[in-house]
Image (cartoon, helix red, strand yellow):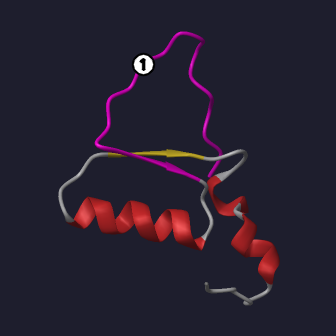
Amino acid sequence: MKLLAPTPGWTATADVIVVGSGIAGLTTALQCRTYGLSVLLVTKARVDEGSTKWAQGGIAAA
């Protein structure tokens, strides 16, 4: 799914802003929605092109 960039000068209101559409970003966005929070997801490209796609199943946890 390709998202279009809004026109310059746009404004948005959200309870939470999530940067990135990898596994951490999408999980965070979904979890916030379960608590009834509004979420703005910002990503550098298409939603399905997060960094997790290129990790080939490997996830490093701290």
Q: Residue at x 62, y 86 (%)?
A: 61
Query: Would you place residue 46 above or below residue 56 in this image?
Result: above
Seen in the image, is 54 located left or right of residue 16?
right
Q: Looking at this rendering, what residue extends furthest in the bottom direction?
A: 57
Identify the residue position indicated by label 1 in the image: 11
Q: Nearer the viewer, residue 37 or 49?
A: 37
Residue 57, located in which quarter of the rendered image?
A: bottom right
Residue 2, how many percent across, how many down? 65, 45
What secondary structure is found at the residue carrying circle 1?
Answer: loop
Quadrant of the drawing holding the C terminus = bottom right
- Is 3 contained in the magenta span? yes
Residue 7, how many percent across, how many down? 58, 14
Seen in the image, is 62 located left or right of residue 52?
left
Seen in the image, is 3 located left or right of residue 35?
right
Q: Residues within 10 Å of mark 1 (few under 14, many from 20)?
A: few
Query: Would you place residue 7 above or below residue 48 in this image?
Result: above
Q: Which of 23 and 1 is in front in this view?
A: 23
Residue 50, how many percent across, how many down? 70, 62
Residue 39, how many percent across, how many down? 36, 47
Q: Residue at x 69, y 50 (%)?
A: 46
Residue 55, located in which quarter of the rendered image?
A: bottom right
| Highlighted range, magenta | 1-19
Name the amino acid type tagged 1. Thr
Seen in the image, is 6 located left or right of residue 14?
right
Query: Would you place residue 60 above or below residue 32 in this image?
Result: below
